[in-house]
Every structure is written in C-alpha cells, then in structure tokens.
Amino acid sequence: MAQHTVTLIPGDGIGPETSSAMQRVLEAAGAEIEWEIAEAGAHLMEEHGTPLPQSTLDAVKRNKVAIKGPVTTPVGSGFRSVNVALRKAFDLYVNLRPNISIEGAGGRYNDVDLVIVRENTEDLYAGIEFEQGSSEAAELIEFCASHNAGTIREDAGISVKPISVTGSRNIVKYAFEYAIAQGRKKVTAVHKANIMKHSDGLFLRVAREVAKEYEGRIEFEDKIVDAFCMNMVIDPSQFDVVVLPNLYGDIASDLCAGLVGGLGIAPGANIGKEYAIFEAVHGSAPDIAGQNKANPTAEILSACMMLDYLGEQECAERIRSAVRAVYAEGEHLTGDIRWATGSSKPACSTTEFTDALI
Ligand code: NAD
C-alpha cells in the first residue's frame, strides 16, 4: 500500500475518542497513513478567537485529503458552523452519505442500500442571514413590500435560500456519474418545487435536463420531499441514489441513518474537485462525550470511504468486513446499538468495540 499523508481534525465532544479508535483500526488493517493533526472546535475560541484557525485550513490545503471528527456549533447565536466554513473554503460541493444495512446493527430494515447525494454549498445553509430588527432586514422587508413580492412581518429574521443552475447541475451530474461508477440503477431528485418555484423549481428543472443526458443508462424520477420522507420510512428499498438540495439532504440523511441503526454507524464524505474531507454524519454528542461510550463505527466507515478515495479499496474492504463480522456476532456492541436492537446485554465501551474490531 502506498504512503498517504492525511490531515486529521479530531474536533470536540466525542470526536477525539472516535478519531483515535479510527486511527487504531486503520493501523491494524495495514493502512500506511501519516497523520497531520489539526485542530478545530469551540475550545480554540479563547486562544485563537476562531474555532477554525488558519493553520487548520493550511493543513487541509497542503494534504488535500482530511478526516474530521464532529465540532460543536452553538445553537441560535455564537460562531457560525466550522463545517459550513470548511465546505465553503474548499468548495466541497458534494456531501455523500451511504446508508447500507448492517446485520445486527438494529436497523428497522435489513435491505437498505441507498446513497444520499446532498448539495453542500448553497440553499438555506449558505449562511446569508439578516438579524431580526437589523437595518438590512428592514430594507429587505421594505423591498419586498414595494415590489409586490409578499409581506414579511416587521419583526422577522430572514435567511436567504439561493439555489443556482451551476450548483444544481454540478450536484445532479455528480449523482449520475456516481450511479454509473458504482453500478447503481436509479437517481431520485427530491425537492419542494410545488411551493418554492424559483429555488427548488430551478433545481428540479436542471435535474430533469441532466437526466436526459443519461437516458437509457440510469433511470430518473423526482419526489416531493414530504412524500419522499414517508416513502423512505415505508419502503426504503425503492431508492438507490438520491440527490437533494442542502437542507433536505441534511434531514433526509439523518432519517436514513435512523432506518439502518442510528447515527453511530452512518458515514459521510464532503467532496470537491480538488479536496475531500471525510466525516461521520453524527455531531459531537455532548451527552456521552469523554465517557468512552461513543460508537466509532461511523468514523471508521468514513475512513473506509477515504481509503476508497485514495485508491486503497482492498484495505477499506478488509475493515468493512471486520465491521460486518463484529455486528453479526453481536457480542461487542456500544450502547446506541444495544438500544436500537432492544438487547438487554451490557453495552461495551468505545475501546472494547475497537479491540473487537481489530
Ligand atoms: P449528535 O449527533 O451529536 O447527537 C444526537 C444523539 O445521537 C445523541 O443522543 C448522541 O449521544 C447520539 N450519538 C451521536 N453520535 C453517536 C455515536 N457515535 N455513538 C453513540 N451515540 C451517538 O447531534 P446533536 O446533539 O443535535 O448535536 C450536538 C452538537 O454537534 C451540536 O453542537 C451540533 O451543531 C454539532 N454537530 C456537528 C456535526 C459535525 O461536526 N459534522 C454534525 C452534526 C451536529
């Protein structure tokens, strides 16, 4: 196996615990990775005045490939999301989240095999917001009123939802190319075009145009997001590759994670044309942080996606088969999975799970 240098951002909360489990597993599987550790998180605010120091951005830039643990984002106020900042800084326009059933992981179904392809840079997550009571909000309210664009209450805060032809085309094309490369059959575009005609409507129009380029090779359908959620819960096996704008993609991927056993086993990747940052779907889980209780599977499977990206598929598959074996055996499972499976057996720690996997 070739030697690779990868930036590792352990993050905060359970991040350092799941990251060190991931490093141990990769080493045991023979992955030749030199880790360059970089920091991000709320704990850096005091010293650096930012949760994302320039040195971390430089480290990602240098190595082009990174894996990151979760980072806590204050709700409602405080600094903006580190994740959103990283996605913007490196134009990581794809958020790839495979949801595949693992026998013994407590999923509601045992035949889920779908991939969420979420647009990662636009939509309501673009971070264009105007605070309630600000002069900018007042100007926008006045603009809408004077242009017959609808009434916004004077005490409203406003978030802007930009969805572009370029952004939509890039993500839908990625979904089709991914489907072809992975031997998948169908792409489903999810939207709310019946209500938001100039944002979701545009996304759907572009998706239909792109789909024509793949006619005869990949099947295409579209679903309204609310109906999609219901269909997902009733029968997830009808979906294959699902492409969504940013916000729906975020929500739908947690829903999918719930169907296969929970956030503890859901991996993900942020991919751009030049850079890639791999990370689990879950957050920093403050309720269990520092207690050796976190399930490291999601970060380990994210590392497998990273190994695939680096051309080390054999090593990735060795780890995935060990994961399947540990779950099928059912002796060493963390608390989240014990809960999902309804088992009364004692939960094992992060370390015990990692030892079993190794
Ligand atoms: P969360 O994913 O951190 O936790 C939700 C629930 O799932 C909790 O009960 C938690 O204990 C459990 N859980 C999550 N991961 C687990 C794991 N690996 N093993 C076992 N149990 C696990 O979501 P939240 O509580 O909504 O968010 C907490 C913080 O994380 C927030 O500040 C949020 O902004 C941040 N967040 C960060 C990222 C990221 O950095 N990529 C993603 C999502 C949320």
Image (tube, helix red, strand yellow):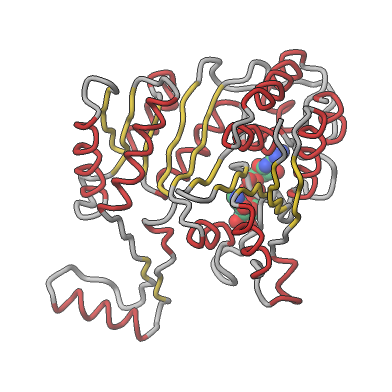
To which quarter of the image does residue 326 belong? top right
The residue furthest top is: 329
Which of these two is toward me, 35 or 337?
35
Q: How many marks?
A: 0
Q: Position of residue 307 (x, y in %)?
A: 64, 34
Q: Position of residue 200 (x, y in %)?
A: 26, 49
Which of these two is toward me, 30 or 200?
30
Which of these two is toward me, 248 or 31?
31
To which quarter of the image does residue 62 belong? bottom right
Q: In which quadrant of the rendered image does the N terminus lie? A: top right
299 vs 236, left or right, is: right
Q: From the viewer's perspective, is residue 288 above or below residue 157? A: above
279 vs 46, left or right, is: left
Q: From the viewer's perspective, is residue 93 above or below residue 88? A: above
Residue at image location 55% in from the left, 42% down from the top: 269
120 vs 187, left or right, is: right
Residue at image location 20% in from the left, 55% down from the top: 198
